[in-house]
Image (cartoon, rainbow, N blue to C red):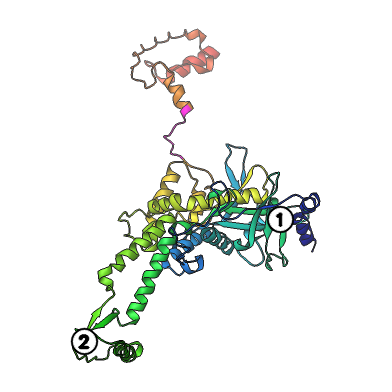
Amino acid sequence: MAERRSALAALTAGLGSLTSKGAGLAMVTDFRGWIGSGIRESSPGAWQRGKKLETSGDLLTYSPIFACVTRIANDIAKLRPLLMAETDQDEVSVKAPKASPYWQVLRRPNPNQTWVQFVKQWQLSKQLFGNTYVLKWRDLRGIVTRLYILDPRGVQPLITPDGSVYYSLSSDQLAMIPTGMRACPASEMIHDRGATLWHPLVGIAPLYACALSGTLGLRIQQNSTAFFANMSRPSGMLTAPGTIDPVTAERLKEDWNTNFSAQNLGKLAVLGDGLSYEAMTIAAEQAQLAEQLGITAVDVATAYAMPAYKINAGPMPTAGNVEALESQYYSGCLQIHIEDIEACLDDGLGVPDGYHVELDLDGLLRMDSLSQMEVLTKGVGGSVLSPDEARAKLNRSKVSGGNSPMAQHQMYSLEALAKRDAQPDPFGMTKPAAASPPPAPNPAPSNDLPKKALPICASGSLLKQLGMELTEHV
């Protein structure tokens, strides 16, 4: 309860001053901003003629749109959140300890959702409605402990005359605001938005760009469903060579619909008086429905920056490098959404300087086994990775002596090579002159030799030398 009271106090901060001073809150609508407001029609005069595009809920029944939206949400949800801390050594980032108070909300954003479910809903809201609104709950320390994603259809940005931003919130039982909130400060919200075409606070979903293609695809599928429900027989008309009075025409029409429609399809019709049946609708093969349906699917993939082959709307690339294809998919489609999530969480959680939230791309850019082993082997052999770091990529435990990068013994540092190059002959190509042998030493006189170290003469015998030594002692 203390946490809830603290959060409610933060959410209502500033509301009293706004109402007491009579400050106005300007509502930001979907198409009000720099370009102006007005009715956006699919074609000129479409609104007067009763023509309209399908709503976002109906467009989700078109499989290419559903595939693009869910593919982006699922792929980003694969990435684990990491709380990184910058070290003093070369500004290298390492994982922050699990005891950090900012880590808990990343592991479990709220009691009702895991991180995977939370990110899925984040992206589904952004891809379908162009905006994701996240309500923050704080503890008594002011640290964010819970995050709730709100229904974007129930949130409205507000702007005060001095430029302050607030949000009007509808009721949400899961977020514990049963009666809603008139003005929630922007400091208690995380707002991730798509392309801001008309106003900086209003994002536009890719559905805006592919609504026509999605509507066309749905119409083709609906017409095809009705066509095949009619036993693949197009509608037509009965004609006669002469004039038919209205009573007879109405009777023939009623008899034909009764006897040859619905469950009576396929029955044999017997016509007389020169009556003939002529088809009026274009058959599916003549209308090239399959080709048009394929074009609409590719157009939807283009709006979402999705490679067409990812949703089975185009040919699979012949390149065998899986990592290169995934890297292209990441940089062209997913990277901007991942960067948005990281930046929003850094700012929304208020992590201190030197810390930042990062999504682990290893869950996305996975290589095949052969390429992965080759990269890791070269990384260890090139002194980039230590054996333990390479083993961690394969989910293997550490080994003794594997915590340091290794290098071969014949490799030298740049400093040692610079000292070698500074020598007059760094490569030792000049042969040194042959040195003359030293002169032989002169033999010392016999009187200078020690008495007990008398050398043996080459010409005398051992017995003679011993006799001489005894004589001298006597």
Q: Read off the residue under disc 1.
A: 184
Q: Secondary structure at mark 2?
A: loop
- Which residue does the image show at 47% across and 14% down from the upper left? 468
User: Is residue 357 among what the camera can see?
Assistant: no
Q: Quadrant of the N terminus?
A: bottom right
Q: Amino acid at mark 2?
A: Leu
* 10 Å crowding of disc 2: few (<14), some (14-19), many (20+): few
Residue 15 or residue 352, whichever sits in front: 15
Q: Which residues are magenta?
A: 407-414
Residue 464 or residue 332, whichever sits in front: 332
Q: Position of residue 329 (x, y in %)?
A: 42, 53
Camera-near label (1 vs 2) is 2
Left or right side of 429 for 465: right
Left or right side of 241 for 202: right
Magenta portion: prevailing SS class: loop
Q: Position of residue 425 (x, y in %)?
A: 38, 17
Tell me: residue 300, above or below residue 259.
Answer: above
Q: Secondary structure at mark 1?
A: strand
Residue 275 is marked as: 2
- Which residue does the image show at 37% across and 72% down from the upper left? 221
